[in-house]
Amino acid sequence: MKEFIKVMKALSDPNRVKMIKLLQRRVLCVCEIQASLGLAQSTASKHLKILEDAGLITYSKDGLWVNYRLADGARNPYVANLLGNLRHWLEEDIEVAALIAKLPEIRRETICGT
Amino acid sequence: MKEFIKVMKALSDPNRVKMIKLLQRRVLCVCEIQASLGLAQSTASKHLKILEDAGLITYSKDGLWVNYRLADGARNPYVANLLGNLRHWLEEDIEVAALIAKLPEIRRETICGT
DNA sequence: TTCATGTTTCGTCATATAGCGATATATAGA
DNA sequence: TCTATATATCGCTATATGACGAAACATGAA
């Protein structure tokens, strides 16, 4: 039950769901996600931790960057099912579509620092 | 997005998920659910309202009783999918199993009032 | 080492949520 | 009408959550 609740809670916040939708397109670092959603950096980081705790995403470090990607969910049926459905769910959502449309402009080299 | 979030939030509370699991077995009135979960009457009623707002359950009145049942979810893909999966999800959960085991003893005639 | 930079954690605040008891509403019967 | 009963709503408290800025941590370069 606890594991199920954790996954549901993780997907109960619009910004976190948007992060999932963005990560369906490509691997992203924290500052790209932060820039895309217009959040403070600490807020983005905290949301990513919640998604990771739920098993929905994983990360790998590459120098200063932390790359986040969708988990495969092999160990968690709730994760596997919901990530699968979220491939098509919310594709028509207006906010999600806007984020996806702007994603090509979001590149870590130009967004971060400078 | 708002509709999706509403469904996820509704399923983010253990007591509400347990209500869904109980309603998979049979139609229940508020006092039966309250007795089964050991909640205050007002708390049970509030949870049921949240589930109903999310489209996960429906109700019909029969005299003094309000009978709650699972929704068919025909109008909401998130509801249809999650209610479908919840038919088998959490069947092995220890708390859920205990509630199901005690469900035959929960009958409105003996539980309510008196 | 020192500095710069991406990320995480901490401290704080405002809002949301779950819980309860008390009260209000609705319906059936006397 | 009045009473009894099942449910819904209100008022309140304690905890959880999401937001931010500031500070700490981690890594790579000078």
Image (spheres, coloured by chain):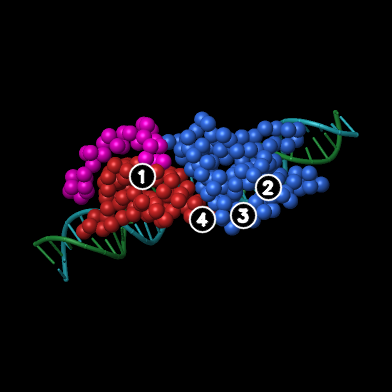
Chain colours: A blue, B red, C green, D cyan
Q: Nearer the viewer, residue A67 or B85?
A: B85
**Of B24 and B45, which appears nearest the observer?**
B24
Cβ–Cβ below 8 Å for labels 2 and 4?
no
B104 on left or right of A56: left
Residue bearing mark 4? B2
Q: Is residue A80 left or right of residue D24?
A: left
Residue at which label 3 appears? A97
Q: Hey, what amino acid is under mark 3?
A: Ala
Q: Amino acid at mark 1?
A: Ile
Q: Which mark is in front, 2 or 3?
A: 3
Q: Which residue is mark 2?
A: A34
Q: Is disc 3 in contact with disc 4, using a CB cutoff of under 8 Å?
A: no
First reached walking from the N terminus: tag 2 or tag 3: 2
2 and 4 marks on the same chain: no
- Circles 1 and 4, Cβ within 8 Å, touching? The answer is no
The residue singled out by tag 1 in the image is: B20
Q: Amino acid at mark 4?
A: Lys
Q: Position of residue D8 (x, y in %)?
A: 33, 59
Cβ atoms under marks 3 and 1 closer than 8 Å? no
Residue at the image position 27 percent from the left and 50 percent from the top: B29
